[in-house]
Image (spheres, rainbow, N blue to C red):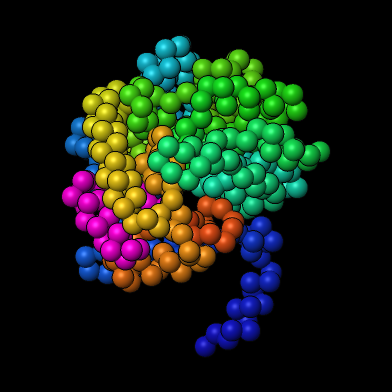
Amino acid sequence: MFSNQSTSNLTRTISPEALGAPPSGIVEVFTYGWGRPGLIPLWAGEGDMSTPSFITEATTRSLAAGETFYTPNRGIPDFRAAVARYMSRLYGQEFSPDRFLCTIGGMHALQVAMRLILSAGDEFIVPSPAWPNFIGCGKVIGAIPVDVPMGLTNEGPNGRWFLDVDRIASAIGPRTRAIVINSPSNPTGWTATRAELEAVLALARKHGLWIIADEIYGQFVFDGSARAPSFHDVMEEDDKIIFVQTFSKNWAMTGWRIGWIECHPSLAQSAENLIQYSSSGVATFLQRGAIAALDHGDSFLHHQVERAKKGCDIVCEGLSKTGRVRFAKPEGAFYLYFKVDGAKDPMGIAKRLVDEANVGLAPGSAFATGEDAWLRLCFARKAEDLAEATARLVKALS
């Protein structure tokens, strides 16, 4: 038998960074509601569509051809060339394959990016509300997150989240090394304007800071544009910007765990070394599926964006009827971040909605500090599910 005391003694001997790794509030609600019959799960950042067959068949062909051996840490040449083709097509400028390295999903890309530029004791700025993994990823390497609240023009469908550049400037100190910018944003749906990106870049240049750019929802925009504004539109070749990317959202590949990091070619060897000592590369057959997604996945992606746009309208129009819900309508990504009037415990109300509405939402406490009961809802699902979930939420909240 193992005693609680011996377990406690073991815990005290692990590294402070591991011991201080923050738990996920999203996982807590997920665990609370998992397996309930009829529950509509809108807590996680993924849709309800399976990976399309043109991607899975490319992987099957690769396996049948015996491509099951070790791979180059940077990714096979075909993969990196496919990313360069995709990026050149999307941004209307020429990209070299030397800028891209294959990773085990967007989380691994973020880990490599942070390890490239942050050391223990360094500070990095994160505008919030923010995806909690930004903060957690920095903490486990001993870096210190600095939470800078975003602004909100007003809480209503015509409101808008915005980046308060003056607040960011005030948060910069002698130990600040980086700013993390996620646009379109998880969880708010905020989508940076070109002017906001230019302002952040000017600030980073002035203080010699790095920017970690998470633009994974770049094509999930609802104003009719082909994509959101990007740091690629405003940066120079030698600007200190590292991009993290994933295949999870665009092509319904969340379970594949494949993505890429983009950096100046002069950093590629250091990035490769970090990949070597963390994952040692991504399986070739997974990269073959990713290549198919990049080369042939535009129509599938556009279909996903249209579904998300329709889903956004369903949940926003429905929840507005409660008279208790406040939000700024998302400009991009596929989340609604909303506040419930009169409620002060986001985890408590998320669990209550599991019990009373049989709908799973993520608590706002996972994304920002504060007493108000904010919740995040993922609307990347079929319209029928979203209509039913919204009806249940309206009944419970009203």
Q: Is residue 42 left or right of residue 237?
A: left
Check residue 397 for magenta coloring.
yes
Q: Inspect this view and state whether residue 370 appears.
A: yes
Residue 341 placed where, x, y %?
46, 59
Toward the viewer: 31 or 66?
Answer: 31
166 over 140 or under it: above or below: above
360 over 319 or under it: above or below: below
At 68% across and 46% down in the image, what residue appears? 146
- In the picture, the quarter occupied by the C terminus is bottom left
At 67% across and 77% down in the image, what residue appears? 9
Q: Is residue 141 left or right of residue 89?
A: right
Q: Inspect this view and state whether residue 277 appears.
A: no
Residue 156 placed where, x, y %?
43, 44
Spot the residue most to the right. 174
Residue 137 placed where, x, y %?
58, 48
Overall secondary structure of the magenta section? helix
Toward the viewer: 376 or 43?
Answer: 376
At 30% across and 46% down in the image, what residue appears? 317
* Quadrant housing residue 43: bottom left
Spot the residue most to the front. 323
The region drawn magenta spans 376-398
At 35% across and 22% down in the image, what residue appears? 226
Residue 334 placed where, x, y %?
36, 41
* Quadrant housing residue 220: top left
